[in-house]
Amino acid sequence: DAGVIQSPRHEVTEMGQEVTLRCKPISGHDYLFWYRQTMMRGLELLIYFNNNVPIDDSGMPEDRFSAKMPNASFSTLKIQPSEPRDSAVYFCASSLIFRQGSFYEQYFGPGTRLTVT
Amino acid sequence: AQKITQTQPGMFVQEKEAVTLDCTYDTSDQSYGLFWYKQPSSGEMIFLIYQGSYDEQNATEGRYSLNFQKARKSANLVISASQLGDSAMYFCAMREGLGNTPLVFGKGTRLSVIA
């Protein structure tokens, strides 16, 4: 089984440009999480979806950030316009719906390293 | 207040020795889960071990074990027989409540295994 797929793996862009990060969750998983990792703030949740519906977006820093999940196999995180402080590693993770005995292990993608100059 | 505290920014251990990475947590929920992830220099997040709040026995997975002390709200990771490949960042994380809620991570501990 393929794991969580993220693209691009690395992105370098100039301040003010639009950036789109992509995520394909593991087939059959119906929870999808976007996390951001920085040296200053560590790993923090941005937004998560259940059955393609956003459940909690309180971690999205500001209106420049938006996320969508148009179907069960694809999600995007968009930053427009990008700023240098958005430089970070962005992780997508997916997990299964509840089942007896499940502990909702989250499977992480390899991350996208974003650099905004 | 931080929900997950990892007080050791960095640790060194001799190869083949055991090492304990500390983690304390803060929650008022009765139902929660505790996770440890490993992040090598390549950057991916690798799940290591899980402990549920109602689990009576400490979790074990190969060379990893979780020393769960509920009254002290601690969930320390023990790595036995350290290997050079264990050198990485280690994150403790918590999921609160019964549902599939997001993880809250600690700041991490950088473990260096010395030959």
Image (cartoon, coloured by chain):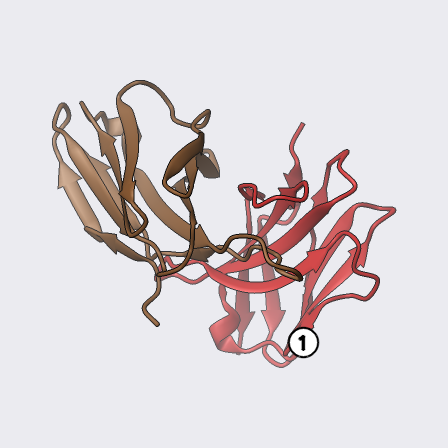
* Residue A56 against residue A25 in the figure, above or below: above
Residue A100 at what x, y percent from top left?
A: 65, 60
- Name, please, the residue furthest toward the right: B71
- Chain ID for label 1? B
Quadrant where the image shows the N terminus of chain B: top right
* Residue B32 against residue A107 in the figure, above or below: above
> Circle 1: is it few (<14), some (14-19), or many (20+) Cα within 10 Å?
some
Amino acid type at image mark 1:
Ser
Whether residue A39 is visible: no
- Name, please, the residue furthest toward the top: A63
The hue used for chain B is red
Q: Residue at x 17, y 34 (%)?
A: A19
Q: Residue at x 47, y 39 (%)?
A: A42
Residue B107 at what x, y percent from top left?
A: 55, 43
The residue wearing badge 1 is B80
Q: Secondary structure at mark 1?
A: loop
The hue used for chain A is brown
Which of B28 and B93 lies nearest the eye of the viewer? Answer: B28
Whether residue B30 is visible: yes
Q: Residue at x 36, y 47 (%)?
A: A91
Q: Residue at x 72, y 55 (%)?
A: B52
Residue B110 at what x, y percent from top left?
A: 53, 56
Q: Quadrant of residue A77?
A: top left
Which of A29 and A40 lies nearest the eye of the viewer? Answer: A29
- Residue A63 located left or right of residue A31: left
* Residue A97 against residue A41 in the figure, above or below: below
Which of B27 and A102 lies nearest the eye of the viewer? Answer: A102
- Residue A22 located left or right of residue A25: left
Residue A12 at what x, y percent from top left?
A: 15, 41
- Residue A24 located left or right of residue B56: left
